[in-house]
Amino acid sequence: MTADDHATGPGSREAYLGRVFDIRDRHVLVTGAASGLGQAIAEAMVDAGAAVTLVDRDADALRQLADALAARNATVAHLVCDVADAAAVQATVEAATTRFGTLDVAFVNAGIAGAPRTDAESRRLERVQLDDWDRVLGVNLTGALNTMRAAASVMRPRRSGCIVVTASTAGLRADPMVGYPYVASKAAIVNVVRQAALDLAPDQIRVNAIAPGPFRTNIGGKRPRSAEAEAAWASTIPLGRMADPEEIKGLALLLASPASSFMTGAVFPVDGGALALSHAI
Ligand code: NAD
């Protein structure tokens, strides 16, 4: 057998990778798909051959992405929905499931940063605004719960599926760079993920979380940011830089595919080493 046979034959490296990461017959729904990490995740799913439903509250950006993906011959649908609206989320997930006949993977990703906090003073406890608190928890926690619940309602009867929630390193430790509402929402959703993993495991539905460190997206205000802001974030990261949205794709594909068939209830950092700095032994 030559090296070429090994690269392309039936028992080849290519065939093995194709099998382990095969999501070609899957329908994947992504919330917060119109920008940043959600867009990158949706692109990864499309490129791996899945049918994808894009969900976002930003109708214009959503349509633009759907058109761009359709031009690449992708099988995509797009549905405008505010994840903070439980009834709208249930209707959206049911419509997407009806359209593609199943829902195999739900990326619960839509999220917001809350009121801008440009300096340490603005991040103080005394400066927490309850309307901001309610808004951030309404999207990042209740919105994520709404989406997980709707996904479970269509997955459980089929006894299969997987749910992947975008949490944050800010949900796993204190974070001087973000505000109270954000850390509260992300810490809470991490334990909701664990609870849901226990609840849904008997029905063979896996539930995991991704915990990104700082990525260059539009969260907290449109990019590009100032060099100072970028440098401040980079200084908190052992790899010494922020991440590009592309860098979420590998983990997203892993968690959506058969490669992660025994992984559930787990939180996976993609953080340039940030959490390694804060873990006690
Ligand atoms: P982004 O602002 O680039 O994208 C977020 C998308 O979610 C936008 O398209 C927005 O319209 C949509 N969205 C916001 N609220 C919504 C709602 N109520 N209903 C429907 N759609 C809504 O931000 P991002 O950085 O890609 O954020 C994606 C997820 O990643 C969020 O949950 C965020 O908390 C998390 N995260 C981001 C970072 C980072 O550094 N960028 C780090 C850790 C976690």
Image: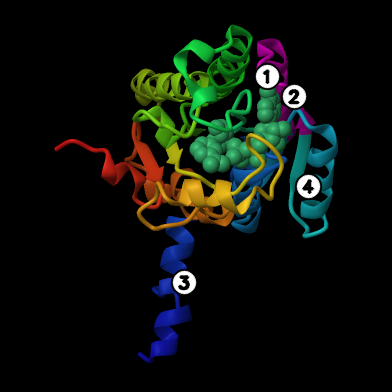
Are there few (<14), some (14-19), or many (20+) residues within 10 Å of tag 2? Answer: many
Upstream in sequence: badge 1 or badge 2:
2
**Which dot marks residue 81?**
2
Residue range corresponding to the magenta coloring: 79-99
Upstream in sequence: badge 1 or badge 4:
4
- Given the image, on which type of amino acid does mark 1 rest? Val
**215 drawn magenta:** no
- Residue at disc 3, secondary structure: helix
Q: Position of residue 267 (x, y in %)?
A: 36, 36
- Residue at disc 4, secondary structure: helix
User: Badge 1 is on which residue?
Assistant: 89
User: Badge 4 is on which residue?
Assistant: 65
**Which dot marks residue 14?**
3
Can you tell which quarter of the image residue 192 is in? Answer: top left
Can you tell which quarter of the image residue 53 is in? Answer: top right
Q: Is residue 83 left or right of residue 201?
A: right
Q: Nearer the viewer, mark 3 or mark 1?
A: 1
**Residue beneath the point at 83% across and 33% down:** 59
Query: In the rendered view, would you say 136 is above or below 113?
Result: above
Most prominent secondary structure in the magenta stretch?
A: helix
Disc 4/disc 2 C-alpha distance (Å) = 15 Å
- Extreme front residue here? 121
Disc 4/disc 3 C-alpha distance (Å) = 30 Å
Depth check, front residue: 156 or 171: 171
Can you tell which quarter of the image residue 206 is in? Answer: top left
Q: Say if disc 2 is inside 8 Å of ligand 1.
A: yes
Q: Nearer the viewer, mark 4 or mark 3?
A: 4
